[in-house]
């Protein structure tokens, strides 16, 4: 990998970190300026529109898989045909999404458990957030797929981070200085996303010109895979979005609390997955080439994810409630049991992307859709049963159980057994990670016994101590456990 790729990766991570900080500031300003209910309406609407990805049915993933083989053999004409097909398909999908926004906005605003926000304001908020979600399907999603194929995923991350930073900075200015209504604030995201499409057009014409210049007819053969991918997307959406919907109907005030914790744990998850996604295209091409050393590199990627997960989860368990208190207030904190449930979910979220990259690289969507269906049904049923009595803790317990009983076992066996022909159990990896986290937290409790956190300086000190402890435990335990894959001479 060239030095500019490494620089691009580091730049993307740095910009994404800035965006994460700005997003937390945005949440606080919205709560202070408009109230927690407006924030809850906005957060709930964003989660609901994530279901619009079902219109896409995994089109991007299917086309990317179909491009791996022609990329491996240098067939640029085939790539150009597939890209043209993807571009046309994405525009058709975006039109269907637009037609669905209006009725959904009126219906969802009606069923929300609102007490302070008027109906029309809620409808307009939902419509604008829907437009902001749909616009990229018109102008940029197909271009991002092509850049990923050409191993420029880091450039996609940098561009998206810059766009998102500009949006949030403009929104913060309108909220805190101009003091506009929430409706006017949301226009910014729509406008900047349209401009982002022009930026991506310039990038692909510079970096992917050899495929774009090929004269060819659109190829739509990848669309035959989308029915299977749809099951996986539905499962993921139920995991990440059904909780917010149910909470918004049962007690909308709990949405802000739930989203605060979700926002924080999502940052380390996204960071690790952004780094992992850089290898998606290269792993897919190497699978097509039947690379004999791919399993070793897969295990190294998995070890990196495990190391980062131990560190992030240890700090999360120790400091998250103190962070929430200082950030938006003690009234937005949850029980220790809820924190542990978020931690269990983080284990899977921070390590399973390596499995998905291999599974998707072989195009095994049909073979694995049953696992996704099992998880989705289990999660939905358990969430409905538990949310009324336990609210946030209830939906999180449902998510954890459905993930570990429905999704993890089947996909692990498919990747390790069917693709790599290895007798390997991912649950052993999880047990090792849990042991490292438990030791880190216990060591912190012994070392920092009675330490009180009342300001940001003390919180930073606490996080640094826990991070160092977790690095030590994770480094020793994982270094021994994964030694055979980490040593240079291993084949």
Image (cartoon, rainbow, N blue to C red):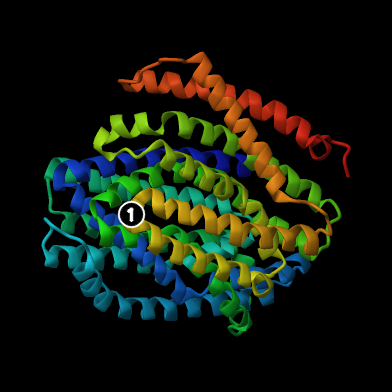
Residue 138, image x and y in percent?
A: 40, 72
Seen from this angle, which residue lies furthest bottom? 217
Question: Is 458 above or below relative to 159?
Answer: above
Q: Nearer the viewer, residue 348 or 435?
A: 435
The residue that disc 1 covers is: 389
Q: Nearer the viewer, residue 356 or 319?
A: 319
Placement of the C terminus among the 4 image quadrants: top right
Placement of the N terminus among the 4 image quadrants: top right
Question: Is 92 above or below relative to 143?
Answer: below
Question: Is 348 above or below relative to 314?
Answer: below
Q: Nearer the viewer, residue 440 or 202?
A: 440
Residue 387 visible, this angle: yes
Q: Quadrant of residue 290?
A: bottom right
- Relative placement, left or right, of 122 versus 50 is left
- Relative placement, left or right, of 449 versus 38 is right
Q: Nearer the viewer, residue 169 or 54?
A: 54
Q: Residue at x 20, y 61 (%)?
A: 113
Residue 390, image x and y in percent?
A: 35, 51
SS at mark 1? helix
Residue 190, image x and y in percent?
A: 29, 62
Q: Residue at x 53, y 44 (%)?
A: 344
Residue 301 visible, this angle: no
Q: Residue at x 26, y 62 (%)?
A: 249
Q: Quadrant of residue 403?
A: bottom right
């Amino acid at each position: 990998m060239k030095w500019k790729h490494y620089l691009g990766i580091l730049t993307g991570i740095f910009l994404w970190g800035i965006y994460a900080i700005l997003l937390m500031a945005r949440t606080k300003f919205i709560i202070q300026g408009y109230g927690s209910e407006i924030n809850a309406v906005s957060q709930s609407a964003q989660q609901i529109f994530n279901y619009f990805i079902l219109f896409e049915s995994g089109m991007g993933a299917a086309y990317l898989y179909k491009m791996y083989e022609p990329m491996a053999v240098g067939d640029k004409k085939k790539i150009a045909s597939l890209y043209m097909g993807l571009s046309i398909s994405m525009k058709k999908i975006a039109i269907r999404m637009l037609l669905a926004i209006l009725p959904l906005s009126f219906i969802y605003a009606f069923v929300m458990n609102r007490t302070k926000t008027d109906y029309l304001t809620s409808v307009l908020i939902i419509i604008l957030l829907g437009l902001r979600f749909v616009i990229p399907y018109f102008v940029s999603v197909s271009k991002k797929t092509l850049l990923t194929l050409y191993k420029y995923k880091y450039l996609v991350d940098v561009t998206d981070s810059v766009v998102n930073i500009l949006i949030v900075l403009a929104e913060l200015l309108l909220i805190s200085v101009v003091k506009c209504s929430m409706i006017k604030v949301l226009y910014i995201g729509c406008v900047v996303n349209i401009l982002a499409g022009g930026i991506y057009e310039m990038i692909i014409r510079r970096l992917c010109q050899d495929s774009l210049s090929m004269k060819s007819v659109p190829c739509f053969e990848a669309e035959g895979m989308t029915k299977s991918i749809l099951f996986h997307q539905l499962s993921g959406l139920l995991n990440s979005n059904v909780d917010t919907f149910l909470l918004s109907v049962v007690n909308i005030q709990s949405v802000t609390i739930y989203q605060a914790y979700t926002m924080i744990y999502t940052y380390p998850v996204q960071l690790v997955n952004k780094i992992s996604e850089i290898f998606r295209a290269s792993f897919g091409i190497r699978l097509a080439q039947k690379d004999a050393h791919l399993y070793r590199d897969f295990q190294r990627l998995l070890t990196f994810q495990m190391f980062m997960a131990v560190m992030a989860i240890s700090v999360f368990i120790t400091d998250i409630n103190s962070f929430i208190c200082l950030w938006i207030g003690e009234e937005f904190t949850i029980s220790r049991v809820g924190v542990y449930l978020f931690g269990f979910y983080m284990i899977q979220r921070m390590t399973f992307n390596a499995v998905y990259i291999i599974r998707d690289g072989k195009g095994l969507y049909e073979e694995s859709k049953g696992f996704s269906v099992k998880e989705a049904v289990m999660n939905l049923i358990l969430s409905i049963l538990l949310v009324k009595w336990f609210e946030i803790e209830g939906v999180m317990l449902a998510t954890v159980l459905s993930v570990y009983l429905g999704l993890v076992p089947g996909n692990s066996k498919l990747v390790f057994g069917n693709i790599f022909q290895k007798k390997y159990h991912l649950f052993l990896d999880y047990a090792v990670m849990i042991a490292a986290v438990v030791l880190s937290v216990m060591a912190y409790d012994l070392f920092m016994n009675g330490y009180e956190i009342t300001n940001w300086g003390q919180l930073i000190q606490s996080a640094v101590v826990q991070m160092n402890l977790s690095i030590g435990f994770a480094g020793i335990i994982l270094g021994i456990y994964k030694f055979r894959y980490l040593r240079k001479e291993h084949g």
